[in-house]
């Protein structure tokens, strides 16, 4: 799928949620597995799964999520033709 298709689909989903909340006065609960997004009485609440908050906290998680330890500016100066 192209970026325009994804963007259009997300916009339609957001508009549908907005219509359900504003026009039809409905409560919405979106369950993502790692979090639950609840919209009730026009209030937004997000509850994250307990396993996620335990895994994300700490230095070990931060180090595994880093793609590189050198500054981005050094990547900009690197000649990829020499690397490959």
Image (cartoon, grey):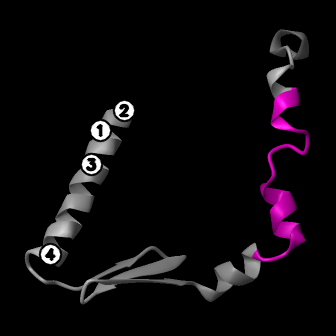
The residues colored magenta run: 57-74
Residue found at x 18% / y 64%: 16
Q: Which residue is mark 3?
A: 9
The part of the image, by quadrant, that contains residue 36 is bottom left
Q: Where residue 46 sits in the image (x, y, percent)?
A: 47, 82
**Around disc 4, counting alpha carbons within 10 Å, would you say few (fewer than 14), some (14 to 19), or many (20 or more)?**
few
The part of the image, by quadrant, that contains residue 69 is top right
Residue 48 position (above or below residue 67): below
Q: Which residue is mark 1?
A: 5
What's the distance in space between the residues labelled 4 and 2, CA to CA?
30 Å
In the image, which disc is placed on residue 22?
4
Q: Which residue is mark 2?
A: 2
| In this picture, residue 41 sits left or right of residue 82 | left
Q: Quick one: label 4 or label 2, which is nearer the N terminus?
A: 2
What's the distance in space between the residues labelled 3 and 1, CA to CA?
6 Å
Q: Quadrant of the N terminus?
A: top left
Residue found at x 45% / y 73%: 32
Q: Quick one: label 3 or label 2, which is nearer the N terminus?
A: 2
Total labels: the figure holds: 4
| In this picture, residue 25 sits left or right of residue 10 | left
Residue 20 position (above or below residue 39): above
The part of the image, by quadrant, that contains residue 60 is bottom right
Residue 1 visible in the shown view: no
Q: Nearer the viewer, mark 4 or mark 3?
A: 4
Is-magenta flag for residue 61?
Answer: yes
Mark 3 element type: helix
Labels 1 & 4 near each other (Cβ < 8 A): no
Mark 1 element type: helix
Labels 3 & 2 near each other (Cβ < 8 A): no
Q: Quick one: label 1 or label 4, which is nearer the N terminus?
A: 1
Labels 4 & 3 near each other (Cβ < 8 A): no
């Amino acid at each position: 799928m192209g970026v325009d298709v994804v963007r259009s689909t997300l916009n339609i989903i957001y508009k549908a949620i907005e219509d359900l909340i504003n026009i039809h006065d409905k409560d919405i609960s979106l369950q993502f597995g790692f979090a639950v997004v609840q919209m009730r009485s026009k209030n937004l609440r997000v509850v994250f799964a307990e396993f996620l908050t335990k895994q994300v906290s700490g230095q070990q998680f931060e180090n595994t999520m880093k793609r590189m330890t050198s500054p981005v500016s050094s990547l900009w100066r690197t000649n990829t033709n020499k690397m490959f």
